[in-house]
Image (cartoon, grey):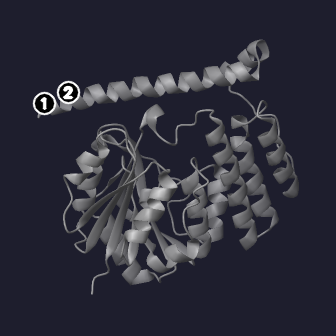
Amino acid sequence: MRPLVSILIPAYNAERWIADTIKSALDQTWPNKEIIIVDDGSRDQTLQVARRFASKDVSVVTQENQGASVARNEAFALCQGDYIQWLDADDLLGPTKIASQVQAADRHGSDWTLFSSAWGRFYYRADKATFDPTALWCDLSPVEWLLRKMGQNLHMPPATWLISRKLTHAAGPWDTRLSLDDDGEYFCRVILASDAVRFVPDVKVFYRRSGSSSLSNKDASYKKLKSQSLSMRLQVENIRSLEDSERVRAACLNYLQTRFLRFYPEHTAFVNQLQQLAATLGGQLEVPRLSWKYSWMQKVVGWAMVKCIRRRYNQWKSAVIGSWHKTLSCFDKIGT
């Protein structure tokens, strides 16, 4: 019998994208699938749009706003699949994504093998997505995958993975304390519970650049800083529980250093926590280095102001690029 694949979609204020996301799930060539959408108390028309797709294979439920991790845990509690496909409400799956990974599982895998895929970034036009291979785009052991991710500051979006139900249970639920980098912490546990990570290159996932409205937008709110700090500490603890070698400690130190600027120097409590964690790794975190266009500003206006300028500039740049791509998308529709 063909295994059932559960496509689980948490959604919050995603009315602009949710229809295309659901369509990409429905368009999967793998026939034995169920789609479960959990609306996390959206304040826009997300729930209404999702309900247009409700059928025997598409379930739509809603809850009070409790965060993406709670919505994901609820979706998993409702599903029956032999395999789990996580899908954020603004991302898209290539049509053969699930079929290719299930076939790879039949050929090479066990219930403990984890499957990933290629992914590309886009704004409004998926056909213009850019795919930039990284050191994670290959078959790897769990420890080697995490070493490369942490040591080289890499990542895989949630939608790239296909996970067996047994492996999902072994990893445990999403951590509801986390609102930023919850996926980094969760998939760290999934990877450590697996026996291997296999990369399936002939399928694609499309990862939308949502700009400042995205949950992953790195603003300076205390909630997000607290979540990022906790996620970092948990990921370091998790990989060290499997291998506490010199190479693991070096990769963890690099991982902490690349994110240190988010906290340094004004968030003293987080800075101290991360320095203490670095000490357990046999090192210490250095004063973050700024690019040339910001380093001279820091000497004039100080750290707090230059970080604010940097954040605002990145938000403005993202908005301008997003607007340009939106305009091009409108011209494409007119042309067709």
Residue extending farthest to the left is: 336
Q: Is residue 32 left or right of residue 120?
A: left
Q: Hey, what amino acid is under mark 2?
A: Phe
Is 132 located above or below residue 79 in the figure? above
SS class, disc 1: helix
Q: Are marks 2 and 1 in contact (CB under 8 Å)?
A: yes
Q: Residue at x 77, y 18 (%)?
A: 302
Residue 199 placement (x, y as % from top left)? 46, 67
Residue drawn at x 69%, y 20% as measured from the top left: 306
> Disc number at residue 236?
none
Q: Nearer the viewer, residue 131 or 78?
A: 78
Residue that carries the numbered disc 2 in the rendered image: 331
User: Which mark is on residue 335?
Assistant: 1
Q: Quadrant of residue 314?
A: top right
Q: Residue furthest top?
A: 300
Frontmost residue, 238 versus 243: 238
Measured in 3D between alpha carbons, the distance from the residue under mark 2 to the one under mark 1, in whole angstroms, is 6 Å
Task: Tell me which amino acid carries mark 1.
Answer: Gly
